Structure formats: structure tokens, C-alpha cells
Image (cartoon, rainbow, N blue to C red):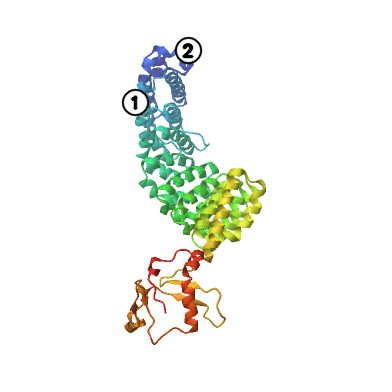
Amino acid sequence: MHELFAQVLNNRDLSRAGDLFSIEDKNLVSDISEVLAKIEEIASASDFTQNDNNQSVVEICITRVTSAIRDTGTIEQHAPAMVSLLESCLNHDLRPLPKDEDPPHAKIASDIVSCIFLNHSKKSIMKLALPVAVKFLHRGNKELSRNLSSYLSLAAINNAELLAVHVQPIIDSIISGNYSLARVLPQIYVVNKEPIHDHVMALVSLLPQCENSEKLSLLNLFGLIAKYKPSLLESNLPHLSECLTISSTAASALQIFLDMAAVRPQSFTEHVQKMKMAAELQPGTLVLVARILGIIGKLNMERAKDSLEFIISHLGKVDQWTLMALLRIIKGITDTFPSLLPQYLTSICNQVEPSASSNIRIYLQQLKMDCRASKTQQQVINQTACGITIVKVGGNKQDPPHVSLTPLSTQTPSSLPLSSFKTTHNGFKDCRSRNNLPGPAEARSMSQLGSLQAINRSMGRLPSSMSTLCMF
């Protein structure tokens, strides 16, 4: 050990302690581990907390040692001695003194932790320090715990797997009020999910007590859970929906909703109004809200109309990029319920066409084509499981309004007597008998059937089962 260090530490010579800063780092670096061991011995003495002189000597020596370690980059060499000194502080009371001052061992721990975690990217250092450091989270010193939370957040960037081993004391610290520590949970979740799954409800319940930055940390975690196991969050939607009213958290909450709605949209029907309000208050969230409504809108016709009306009402207020996104969502809903497009297309065009870009106009043209197809579909003859209903055009007023043609395969044996069938040269079954010739109305019906090909051109292709007809 350097002579001056030996004098100061062995004799507790506070008068010479200041001279330690005049020694060059290179003359101290080889003695640092020995110096740290001596400091640990002094700080572990039973009278240390009552001896102001010894506390001052230790404080100055630690400052000089940590400065030399930083300047010489020798943390790996002296990490074991530093962690040993840090761990020794756990043997003492770290709770603040009556005047809200830190006790001496809390000050030592704070200085050592600060020096160690400047090297948070060095895995070998973190492997030594983290098992000891996390123990300080539950020693009754909020300031030390808060500072340590910041350091652990840095350590989690490159050492999540090392912190994941200690996820339980970390979660316990967060639940007990150390909300800033929530910043480490997203990184830990990537490598160790199950312990966090066990505490989802407790973590969600903390949102109202957290500051906005702390809310965002928790929402980042819930966003990962929503992608991996969204069912865990379903019972917590009321708490999550409260974040929709806060500008800094609305987008994060909506992204969680979007990922969950993709799996189970029914859960979000009762939160539609809050989402709409979020879009009104935070225009930047409009696309997220519209995407969620686009999913909900596919549940049924009523939801589809509600979603379309909200989205269409914003078409004239947005930029071209947002407009294209909204039109895609509209198309997704109307693809599911084509009959809705004709009643909304005019409103869409009125809002979009005056300032539409060429790309938007192309998209509008596609919607118009979809609309024409939807109208045509409404005019197509209804297909049923039993056959096809043909709407009669023309004829006398006394004639029946339509003729129902049913494929022969669907007729029951009892419905037509065997004696009435006759095989013709073209393979058709003729239902007429010599004594049962058609009357005038039947003749007209048969005449219309003779024009079936012409009717087909307006009604589309008939099912293959109609290739054999029983005409009567």
C-alpha cells in the first residue's frame, strides 16, 4: 500500500487525507484492492457510526479510489474488492436518520454503486455486482433504491438475462412503490416471461399512482404481453382505458388495444366511445383508433355502420397519408358488408375528391367499382338450398308472380307419379301425360322456360343441378 494511504488509513489521519489527491493515479492503481479491504475493515467496526473522524477518512479515501479506478479503467481488476465492500454495507442499518440524512454505510454503498454501474455494459462486472446490488432495493432507503433503479435500467440494456434471475425482488420493489424500476421490466420480459405473467394484475393496478414516464414503462411491458399472451390483460381493460385520456400515454394504450382486438375484438365494444374521444383529443392517434374500429366493425352490421360513420366524418380533416390509411380501413369493413358501401360512397366522395391526389383517386375508383358490384349483387337471383327462385317478368295479371324451379334431384318420389315420366330423345324427363296436357297458364310458363337462356344472361350462371329439369 502506498505510504500516504497507509498513514491515513492506519492512523485515521484526517489531516493528511486531502494530500491523497496529489498522488498520481499510476502510483495508486496497484494498491486499490488493498485500500478497499482496509476501508471495509474500518467501516465494519462497531463504533464506526458514532465516529465522525473515521467516517470522514473513509469518505475521502473512497472518493480518491473510485476516481483512480475511473481514470485508469481498471474496474475489472478491482471489482471483487469493490463488491465485497458493497456487500458489507448490507450488514448495517441503511434507513435514513431522523434528520432525513443517509447513515454512513448508505453513503458508502451509494459511492460504490455509482462507480460500478458506470461500467454497466461490461458483463463480467455486472455478473459480480447485480446479485448484491438488487438486495439494496429492500433495505428501507428510498433514495438509495431510486438511484439503484436508474443504474439497473442501464444494466438491463445489455444484461437482461442477468437481471431476469432477480425478477421477483425487482417486482416486489415496484409494487411497494419504487415505480421507476418498472423501466427494467420490458427487457426482463423478453428473457423471463412467466414471473411477470404472475403479477400482471398487480402491475396494471399501479397505473393510477405512477407518473407519466412510469406509466409509459408499464405500458411498454403490457404492449409486449399483448403480443404474446393478450388474454392476461382482458380483465384489466378498464384500467388501461384510463390511459386513453392522457396525451403522453394514449398512443401506447391504443397500440395495446389494437394487438388485443386482433385476437378478440368483442372485448373492446364497450370502450369504443373512449377510443373515439382519444382520437378527437389527440389527432395523432386517429389511425390507431380507426384500425381498432375497423376490426370491431367486422363483428356485425350495427358495429360496421358505427365505425364507418366515425371514420368517414374525419376524411376531410386529414393529410393524404392518413386519408389513404382511412380509406383502406373503410374498404376492409365494406368488403365484409358490401351492402353498406352504396349508402356511404357519396359521403366519402364528397369529402375526398376535392383535394384527392392521383393515388387517392385511383383508390376511390376501386371503391366505386366495389359499389357497382354490390348493387349488381343485390339484383342477382337469391340462391337457396332447395334451388333457385326466378322472378317472372311480364305475363298476365292473373299469372302467378313467379315460377319456382327445383332441380329434379331435390324432388321426392312421392311428388311425381311414375306414370307421368317419359324419356325423350334428348334425355330430359317429360312430366306430361297424354291425358294431362298443359293449360293456357302452364303453356305460358313453358314458353317462359323456353327463354331461359335469355334470362340467364341477366341473372348469372345457374347451378349445374339445373342441367336436368322437370318441366310441368
From this viewpoint, is residue 275 visible?
A: no
Query: Of tags 1 and 2, which is closer to the observer?
Result: 1
CA distance separating discs 1 and 2: 26 Å
**Where does the C terminus fall, quadrant-wise?**
bottom left
Front one among 224 and 200: 224
Number of numbered discs present?
Answer: 2
Q: Is residue 363 above or below residue 23?
A: below
Image point (37%, 30%), residue name: 126
Task: Determine whether, in the image, residue 28 is placed left or right of residue 372.
Answer: left
**First of labels 1, 2 by sequence position:** 2
SS at circle 1: helix
Query: Given the current orientation, which residue lies at the most extreme front position?
Result: 425
Amino acid found under the numbered disc labelled 1: Pro
Residue 130 x/y as whole percent: 37, 33
Residue 332 x/y as whole percent: 51, 54
- CB contact under 8 Å: marks 1 and 2: no
Question: Circle 2: is it few (<14), some (14-19), or many (20+) Cα within 10 Å?
Answer: few
Which circle marks residue 50 in the picture? none
From this viewpoint, is residue 150 visible?
A: yes
Residue 75 x/y as whole percent: 39, 22
Q: Name the residue carrying label 2.
A: 22
Q: Name the residue carrying label 1.
A: 80
Front one among 45 and 396: 396
Front one among 247 and 388: 388
Task: Determine whether, in the image, residue 209 is placed left or right of residue 166.
Answer: right
Residue 421 x/y as whole percent: 34, 80
Front one among 261 and 59: 261
Question: Circle 1: is it few (<14), some (14-19), or many (20+) Cα within 10 Å?
Answer: some
SS at circle 2: helix
Image point (39%, 73%), residue name: 469
Amino acid found under the numbered disc labelled 2: Ser
**Where does the N terminus fall, quadrant-wise?**
top left
